[in-house]
């Protein structure tokens, strides 16, 4: 079945460091790919998404490129801030012939940024 | 802004109790979802609904039921709570027009003793 694998955390960085969180997926067809972020004490919120191969999603300085050849959607940011400390979830939405979409989530990666 | 609210942030219940978790969204979304979030397991889909009075099982429906009598409200019911249902429960909604983007509530942390 469809699945998402992301790197184990926590990822610990100093402020202004470069961030990469790896995400790979297994799916049939052409899923859409997402990164959601969960700040402490809050629900998840959409960070960025990409709906087809080679698309790049970006938001708040974060980027991820849909790589079909490597089935990957790695999250990157050039310079992290303390306020980026959160749990990041990679997710996919398998193609479905209905008006709604289910999401399949990875296990989440906790990012801790120190001043 | 889309708002998804959940009735409680924290709940403590006893084994065997019937537990109701309520979720309300204010954006007229057709689709609503219930997930549980556990360390190392990510989010797992319990049930979802794509219309009033319609419901579909997700990946882990055992021990749960749901109710959607009104479009804005989606309830998760634990008929007889057990300790292995101690978890964080997240509700989400999405509009059919957007399809893929889900909007999440803040979560309910449930402890079953």
Image (tube, grey):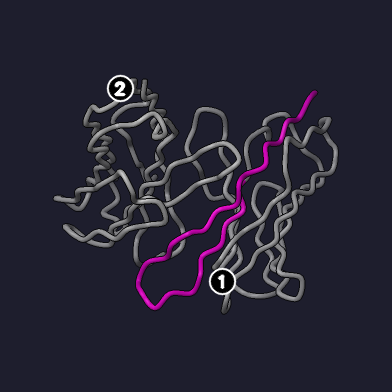
Instruction: Please give left or right for residue B111 compared with residue A5 in the image.
Output: left
- Residue B106 found in image quarter: top left
Mark 2 residue element = strand
- Residue A40 found in image quarter: top right
The spot of residue B94 in percent (x, y) is: 37, 56
Between A41 and B98, the residue placed more toward the observer is A41
Which region of the structure is painted magenta?
A89-115
| Relative to B113, residue A80 above or below | below
The spot of residue B4 in percent (x, y) is: 35, 41
| Residue A31 tag number | 1
Q: Chain of mark 1?
A: A
The spot of residue B33 in percent (x, y) is: 35, 51
Residue at 55% from the left image edge and 53% from the top image edge: A105
The spot of residue B97 in percent (x, y) is: 36, 67
Mark 1 residue element = loop
Which quarter of the figure is the N terminus of chain B placed in?
top left
The answer to whether dots 2 and 1 both sit on one chain is no
User: Few, some or many C-alpha atoms within 10 Å of disc 1 (few <14, some 14-19, many ≥20)?
Assistant: many
Q: Chain of mark 2?
A: B
Instruction: Please give left or right for residue B75 compared with residue A33 in the image.
Output: left
Closer to the eye: label 2 or 1? 2
């Amino acid at each position: 079945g469809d699945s998402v694998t992301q790197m184990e955390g926590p990822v610990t960085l100093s402020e202004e460091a470069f961030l990469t969180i790896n995400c790979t997926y297994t799916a049939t067809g052409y899923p859409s790919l997402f990164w959601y972020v969960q700040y402490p004490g809050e629900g998840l919120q959409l960070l960025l998404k990409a709906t087809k191969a080679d698309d790049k999603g970006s938001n708040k300085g974060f980027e991820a490129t849909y790589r079909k050849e490597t089935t990957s959607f790695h999250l990157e940011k050039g310079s992290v801030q303390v306020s980026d400390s959160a749990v990041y979830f990679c997710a996919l939405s398998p193609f479905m012939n209905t008006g709604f979409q289910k999401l399949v989530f990875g296990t989440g990666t906790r990012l801790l940024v120190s001043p | 802004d889309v708002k998804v609210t959940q009735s409680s942030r924290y709940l403590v219940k006893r084994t065997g109790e019937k537990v109701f978790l309520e979720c309300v969204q204010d954006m007229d979304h057709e689709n609503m979802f219930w997930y549980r979030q556990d360390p190392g397991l990510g989010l797992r889909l319990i049930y979802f609904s794509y219309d009033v009075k319609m419901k579909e099982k997700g990946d882990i429906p055992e021990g749960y039921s749901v109710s959607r009598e009104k479009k804005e409200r989606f309830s998760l019911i634990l008929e007889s709570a057990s300790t292995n249902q101690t978890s964080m429960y997240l509700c989400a909604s999405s509009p059919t027009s957007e399809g893929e983007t889900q909007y999440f509530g803040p979560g309910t942390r449930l402890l079953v003793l």
